[in-house]
Amino acid sequence: MRPVAHAVTATSANSAETSKVVRNTYSLLSITLLFSAVTAGVSMAVQPPMFTGLICSLVAMALIWFVLPKTANSGAGLGVVFAITGLLGFGLGPMLTHYLAMANGGMIVMNAMGTTGITFLGLSAYVLTTKKDFSFMGGFLMVGMFAVIGLAIISLIASFFFGMDMSVVSLAISGAVVLLMSGMILFETSRIVNGGETNYLIATVGLYLAIYNLFTALLHLFGAFSGDD
């Protein structure tokens, strides 16, 4: 009976730890999304140049790759998470200003925001309810992201150096990002629920990036199909 008792105790402990990670992740995610909204509002008020978004993204990526892994198990990691999400929120300001300046800009932003929220809540609720394992999607998502990044670079070169109209390709990239980020939400949530990710700071950043990229891609699509982009 003792081995069985130990197994039950271990299972209960793992379940409690997973529940704690889920609770902490979604609590911190909510706070960081609000914090990003505040920094985006500050950015819109300050009106920095358009390239601010690129600079903020590069700095945020550097923090994710080189700083967060070293601080994720300490109190400093929380500050790094807020630095990442604050930078990305601030970098979003010029883009939001651009779309809000359109004739129906408010509707474009609200549609993108609403669709992002519904998508995230729906996919997360599905995984949290079913606890289905989507770890098999990891390789596909990585290949897909490299393909999208490569296509984006080619599109940028063709547009900048050769003056080619790459608007259709740009829309295709945004559509691909929507699909990839939806898959990323399933993948990241599955890792949290099934114990694949036990650090809530890293889990929060993973879900935040999926939401952030999903929102910007939808913003581009709604803006383009509105006829004003």
Image (spheres, helix red, strand yellow):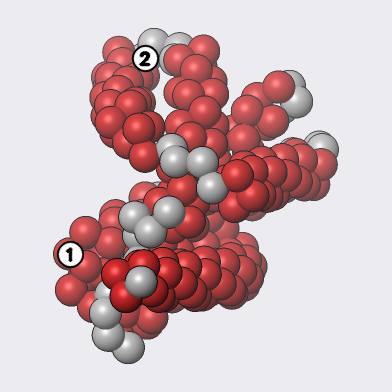
- The three-letter code of the residue at mark 1 reads Phe
Q: Quadrant of residue 152?
A: top left
For the view shown, which residue lies furthest in the front direction?
A: 1
Residue at left offset 21%, top offset 59%: 65
214 up-or-down from 15: above or below: above
Image coordinates for residue 182, horizontal then vertical, percent: 53, 36
Asked whether, in this view, residue 15 is left or right of residue 103, the answer is: left
141 up-or-down from 49: above or below: above
Q: Does residue 56 appear in the picture of this structure?
A: no
* Viewer-side residue, 206 vs 221: 206
Q: Quadrant of residue 57?
A: bottom left
CA separation, marks 1 and 2? Answer: 36 Å
* Viewer-side residue, 159 vs 61: 61
* Viewer-side residue, 228 vs 208: 208
Q: Quadrant of residue 1?
A: bottom left
61 up-or-down from 133: above or below: below
- The three-letter code of the residue at mark 2 reads Gly
Residue at left offset 69%, top offset 43%: 122
Label 1 or label 2, whichever comes before in sequence order = 1
Q: Around disc 1, counting alpha carbons within 10 Å, would you say few (fewer than 14), some (14 to 19), or many (20 or more)?
A: few
Residue at left offset 54%, top offset 32%: 178
Q: Secondary structure at mark 2?
A: loop
Q: Which residue is mark 1?
A: 66
Image coordinates for residue 118, horizontal then vertical, percent: 72, 44
Asked whether, in this view, residue 157 is left or right of residue 222, the answer is: left
Q: Which residue is mark 2?
A: 163
Q: Does residue 121 appear in the picture of this structure?
A: yes
* Viewer-side residue, 52 vs 20: 20
Image coordinates for residue 220, horizontal then vertical, percent: 59, 33
